[in-house]
Amino acid sequence: MARVLSGIQPTGDIHLGNYLGAVRGWVDDQHAQDAYFCVVDLHALTLPRDPAELRAKTLETTLLLVAAGLDPDVCTLFVQSHVHEHPELSWILESVASMGELRRMTQFKEKAKEGEESARVALFTYPVLQAADILLYDAEQVPVGEDQRQHLELCRDIALRFNHRYGETFVVPDAVLPKVGARIMDLQRPAAKMSKSADSPQGTVLVLDEPAVIERKFKRAVTDAGTDVTFDPVGQPGVANLLQILGAATGRQPAEVAVGYDQYGPLKADTAEAVIELLRPVRERYADLAADPEAVRSTLRQGAQKAEAIAAVTLARARAAIGLLSRS
Ligand code: AQP
């Protein structure tokens, strides 16, 4: 049984991209693999956040993961900041990572919009913390969306370099991307990925959106000039995105889905319908769970204990390898 680990930021409302690109696969993984999932609240500190909102979103995100099907009795579900080994290992790994490789991270360039001078140091170093999240659990596989591929490469490079300098310490992980749905685009701006933090409420389908809202968002989705329905992500990014979503929601390849359509209207209507049915059970379970959030909070305490038991062993190994004197 392979060990898998992945995480999600509590930085906003979980959207269809998060669901199709990551969370839905995690639900399957938990039964086939030794699975660890964390709500990465420390990553949320890379940009300005309201403290009360961050706390609330951390709990909401956890509730949503459980509503989506993560079973805390089957997988280990925890909050990143509850396991202090994460920032501790991150510091050790920062002594192995270079400024140059962090500067090449495209997410840093995109998110440091106001310029590097005013960007938080944490935004710059966050891929190293992400590497620590993964390496602490000896994860062999990391199921993520396409946007995380570069960070995963960095994590592998850091692990390999550490092992080379200080002896075999870390398992070198592989990224695992879904075959369809690895990069869901914004419905209003199909050149940009659907994102929690983008200011595009009509382009972002939230997992908890009411059916009528989902229908409206798809009806207004930007399509392309022309009338053909073919899967052409470069020439027809808007239509290709709809085909990808419908394919991911119904277990088919986007090109195969395209064969059944010669107009945009029916494609939009069917995509909306498939997404509504896909998300309906998640929304209903969320409503039940939100009525008693304390139950999920107690599973988070158990999750942190289970996670810490493994993280502590790996951290001790890394500390010893790099030459830190043990306390005992
Ligand atoms: N548009 C997407 N299509 C497919 N997968 C996606 N993921 C995110 N957006 C898409 C995947 O969802 C997982 C959790 O994402 P995250 O919240 O940790 O990171 P993110 O990539 O930063 O997500 P957002 O929604 O874009 O948040 P903000 O705007 O706050 O940065 C990851 O596996 C990610 O690949």
Image (spheres, grey):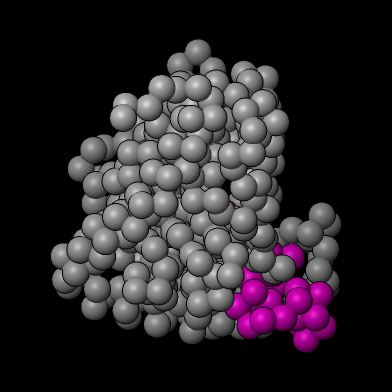
Q: Is residue 254 magenta?
A: yes
Left or right placement of residue 15 versus residue 159 in this view: left
Q: Quadrant of residue 208?
A: bottom left
Residue 141 left/right relative to 50: right
Q: Residue at x 44, y 22 (%)?
A: 324
The one of 72 and 54 positioned closer to us in this rendering: 72
Quarter holding the N terminus is bottom right
Instruction: Identify which residue is drawn at 66% across, 66% down.
Output: 178
- Residue at 21 percent across and 61 percent down: it is 297
- Closest to the observer: 198 or 153? 153
> Which residue sits at x=40%, y=33%?
87
In the picture provided, is 206 more to the left or to the right than 104?
A: left
Is the residue 169 above or below the residue 174 in the image?
above
- Magenta span: 239-262
The single residue placed furthest to the top in the displayed view is 117
Q: How many marks?
A: 0
Image location of residue 241, percent across then percent down: 68, 64
